[in-house]
Image (cartoon, rainbow, N blue to C red):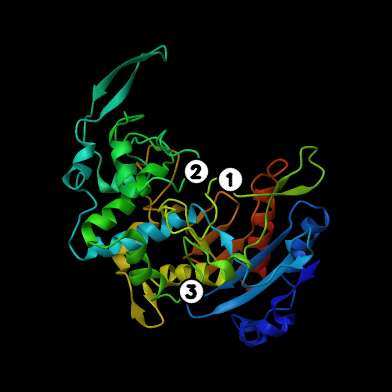
Amino acid sequence: MKVLSWNLPRLLLVSLPLMACGQQPIKPGAIADRIQPFVDRELLAGAVMLAASQERVLAVETVGWADREKKIPMAADAIFWIASQSKSMTAAAFMMLVEEGKVSLDDPVTKYLPEFQGQKVRGKGSDGKALAPVPLERPITIRHLLSHTSGLPFKAPEEEPTLDTLSLAARTAAYGRLDLDYQPGSDYRYSNAGINTIGRLIEILSGQSYESFMGERLFRPLGMKDTTFWPDSAQQSRIATSYKASPDKKTIVPVQVGQLRYPLEDPTRTPMPAGGLFSTASDVGNFCRMILGGGVWEGKRLLKADSVSALTSRQTPPELKNSYGLGFSTGGGKAGHGGAYSTNMTVATKDGLVLVWMVQNAGWRTDEGKEILGVFEKAAREACGRP
């Protein structure tokens, strides 16, 4: 089933101004029609798709179901667990503290977190066998944390069974007890621990809780009213059901987000900087449009242009394959981030275009998730005259 946002009466006032893309109106369904076959083939339950320029939203379309079993159509204001897209938002908020002179990207982490003192790197022989840990050749810096080059592993053993149990202070204490996987700055390995440590630094440097700082400095100024770590009952009624491939790979079946503790509104759940946020296509679009605008949102500057450039420019060493900025994947004139359940956002700076892809899929049959995302991005670019 395909549902276009401008055909929903309750969204009519929002949808009517979204028709123009460049100088030409978008044909209703131009994007959704390209995704519908994947819904028909039971590869995808549903999606919300948004395209925008810095100045305005250009198109919002929906396709398929928010809940296949209950036959609830996908709505433009559906809420999704955006998981690791939280990293980009955490990094952007942290840069506000850099701008205020409270911290430097090249400061050693031990300047603010003494629990990281005395860390070592796992020793490894030429045959790959473990050896005694060796001293650090250089300290972990803030830049290392933000670019996944710190040497910290993905997470600490204490972060089980869910990712929202330990406080940020307890997390950083656990990270400080770990040996690093490699010398800081010498390699790239994706690490929730690094970004969670940034969240703790936000608390130390600002004197506020991490979640309060995010709300006050980023979410409220950007009008991100449905972006939260603790969706309330009304918001939970709008959360799209998550799916994964069935065991026989013939269809998709519903699945609960196992990385989080329930009930979701429980205030004792820790707001996880590396992946705890829920949001909507509209809210994520607002954030991306601010980034596309070089830090400006609706005429107000939230970040300096230099800060946005640092966030979205490669920070990983040139000899490494992985191109990553500060909380953003980078490369090819684009920056953005994906989430564990297949959500994605792209800021195409050279094209002046924002693309937001909101789905909830915890596992594809093979790698068709990448194919479907590519079809969406191609369709959106063509509809907006930016092929």
Query: Circle 2 — which element?
Result: loop
Q: Earlier in the sequence, mark 3 or mark 1?
A: 3
Of residues 92 and 86, the one nearer the viewer is 86
Q: Quadrant of the N terminus?
A: bottom right
Q: Quadrant of residue 298?
A: bottom left
Q: CA distance from mark 1 to mark 2?
A: 7 Å
Which x, y percent locates residue 262? 55, 52
Q: Earlier in the sequence, mark 1 or mark 2?
A: 2
Residue in the picture at 45% in, 69% down: 287
From the viewer's perspective, is the residue at label 3 or at label 2 nearer? 2
Which x, y percent locates residue 99? 23, 65
Q: Which mark is residue 225?
A: 3
Q: Quadrant of the C terminus?
A: bottom right
Residue in the picture at 53% in, 53% down: 338
- Tell me the residue that label 2 is attached to: 162
- Tell me the residue that label 1 is attached to: 258
Identified by mark 3, the residue type is Lys
Which x, y percent locates residue 148? 38, 43
Categorize mark 1 by other alpha carbons within 10 Å: few (<14), some (14-19), many (20+).
few
